[in-house]
Amino acid sequence: MSDCLFCRIVAGEVPATVVHETPTTLAFRDIGPQAPTHVLVIPREHHDDVGALSDADPGLLASVMSAAVAVARQEQLSGGYRLLANTGDDAGQTVHHAHVHVMGGHRLAGLG
Ligand code: 5GP
Ligand code: ZN
């Protein structure tokens, strides 16, 4: 989808600081970090959100989650980390290409 920001990052049309790659996933630093380490992990293929991705290709969703864990280890988040996937309007999803946030590097605020 040429009008999708993250598809444009996959295509190399929009610059990003890439920290991890697999044949099916890409991980890059969030432009507005909410934690000392804040990386986004995406499937290279476009899916609107993780629900759509789960329906279309659950194996690819598993690959995204495994890549997120690999990023957390690579970033040495030994004190812990959060994997988060905002899905739909009520969650405040702003980019409609499935993605998982990897956040850590300090004590994260509780979700409640
Ligand atoms: P969402 O709110 O959809 O869960 O997360 C979208 C994330 O994408 C936000 O945390 C936002 O900071 C990040 N973001 C938006 N535009 C860009 C961009 O052009 N480059 C990068 N690296 N991150 C972006
Ligand atoms: Zn896309």
Image (cartoon, helix red, strand yellow):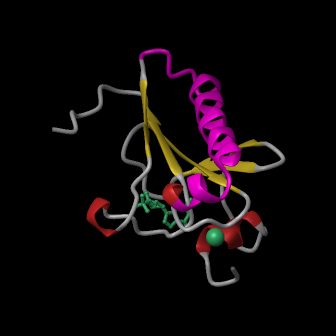
Q: Residue furthest top?
A: 78
Residue 92 position, x and y percent, is 31, 64
Q: Nearer the viewer, residue 98 or 109?
A: 98
Q: Residue furthest front?
A: 55
Residue 107 position, x and y percent, is 30, 25
Residue 18 seen in this snapshot: no
Task: Quadrant for residue 66, please give it.
Answer: top right
Horizontal side of 39 relative to 56 (left or right) equals: left
Q: Residue at x 44, y 49 (%)?
A: 85
Residue 102 position, x and y percent, is 49, 39
Quadrant for the C terminus in the image = top left
Quadrant for the N terminus in the image = bottom right
In the image, is residue 71 above or below residue 32?
Answer: above
Q: Which secondary structure dominates the residues rendered in magenta?
A: helix
Residue range in magenta is 52-79
Residue 105 position, x and y percent, is 42, 28
Q: Nearer the viewer, residue 53 or 22?
A: 53
Ligand 2, seen in the image, is in the quarter at bottom right
Q: Residue at x 55, y 59 (%)?
A: 98
Q: Residue at x 71, y 50 (%)?
A: 26
Q: Nearer the viewer, residue 11 or 57?
A: 57
Q: Nearer the viewer, residue 89 or 81?
A: 89
Task: Quadrant for residue 84, please give it.
Answer: top left
Residue 17 painted magenta: no
In the image, is residue 97 above or below residue 84?
Answer: below
